Image (tube, rainbow, N blue to C red):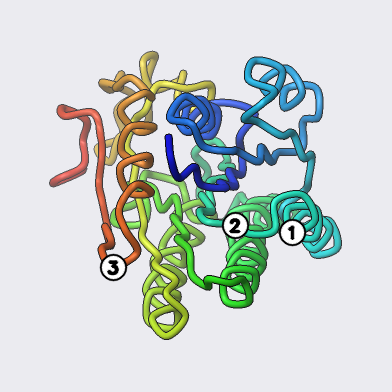
């Protein structure tokens, strides 16, 4: 590759983030791996030490995120792509039974963390020379329609769409593109339950189709491969037969 990019991926220790990190590294890019699990990140980075750098970080902690971007700046001097992927959810629970602590736990990662990573990436991309870059947010199918009992996850993912749209608008003058990938039922640790039974809108519990997570990695890699004059604003990639259009 003649023009490798510096790529930041959050939630890189497993699932979608891990698959994307491997795809970017195999394509010749330099990948900064971010998650809270240092052991998992180190093990992944060891598979391609010339292209992957492990950087444990709690994305919901402003000081840790500031230190993350300072480390990227010191080591690479710039940042070309940030994949805002870290996220978590809860088992299906009605709002009356969700504790404040669980609400804040989901919101702190899915929304506070997305804001902090986007803020740091935007600031770095605006200041570097040549300025510009690309931020890709993981919105999820739940950025469009909810699952039963998913208030914290769905509310935060709807908010990600607002973040994406505003960054797209604000970033124009700085050559910063922002797009969103909305993913449905990619096979990973987080979606293992889909093949066993998921609560449906009619009250039933049914297994749902899943797709290989590699399809997500290929999609994110495509979004990042475009020149900054072009942008995939929103992409939905999902298991074809999962309940989404007309969900419930």
- Could you say which disc has been placed on residue 231 in the image? none
Where is the N terminus found, in terms of image quarters?
top left
Q: Confirm or deny contact between disc 1 and disc 2 (CB under 8 A).
A: yes
Find residue 12 and report its horizontal and vertical position in percent: 61, 34
Dot 1 or dot 3, earlier in sequence: 1
Q: Residue at x 67, y 67 (%)?
A: 120
Q: CA distance from mark 1 to mark 2?
A: 8 Å
Q: Is residue 203 above or below residue 62?
A: above
Q: Which residue is mark 3?
A: 229
Q: Residue at x 38, y 49 (%)?
A: 224
Q: Splitting the image into 4 quarters, where does residue 100 fall?
A: bottom right
Dot 3 or dot 2, earlier in sequence: 2
- Could you say which disc has been placed on residue 73 in the image? 1
Q: CA distance from mark 3 to mark 2?
A: 17 Å
Find residue 9 and report its horizontal and vertical position in percent: 58, 43
Q: Is residue 77 above or below residue 9?
A: below
Where is the C terminus found, in terms of image quarters?
top left
- Could you say which disc has been placed on residue 79 in the image? 2
């Amino acid at each position: 590759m003649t023009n490798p990019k510096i790529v930041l991926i959050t939630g890189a220790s497993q699932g979608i983030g891990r698959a994307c990190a491997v795809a970017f590294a195999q394509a010749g890019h330099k990948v900064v791996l971010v998650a809270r699990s240092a052991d998992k990140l180190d093990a992944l980075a060891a598979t391609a030490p010339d292209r992957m750098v492990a950087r444990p970080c709690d994305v919901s902690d402003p000081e840790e995120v500031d230190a993350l971007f300072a480390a990227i700046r010191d080591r690479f001097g710039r940042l070309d792509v940030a994949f805002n992927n870290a996220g978590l959810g809860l088992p299906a629970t009605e709002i009356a039974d969700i504790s404040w602590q669980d609400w804040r736990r989901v919101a702190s990662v899915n929304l506070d963390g997305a804001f902090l990573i986007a803020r740091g990436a935007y600031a770095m991309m605006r200041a570097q020379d040549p300025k510009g870059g690309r931020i890709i947010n993981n919105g999820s199918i739940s950025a469009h329609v909810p699952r039963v009992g998913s208030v914290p996850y769905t509310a935060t993912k709807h908010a990600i769409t607002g973040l994406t749209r505003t960054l797209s608008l604000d970033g124009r003058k700085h050559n910063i593109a922002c797009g969103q990938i909305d993913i449905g039922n990619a096979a990973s640790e987080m979606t293992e339950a889909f093949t066993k039974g998921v609560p449906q809108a009619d009250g039933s519990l049914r297994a749902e189709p899943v797709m290989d997570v590699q399809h997500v990695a290929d999609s994110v890699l495509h979004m990042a491969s475009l020149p900054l004059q072009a942008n995939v604003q929103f992409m939905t990639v999902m298991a074809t037969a999962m309940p989404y259009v007309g969900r419930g």
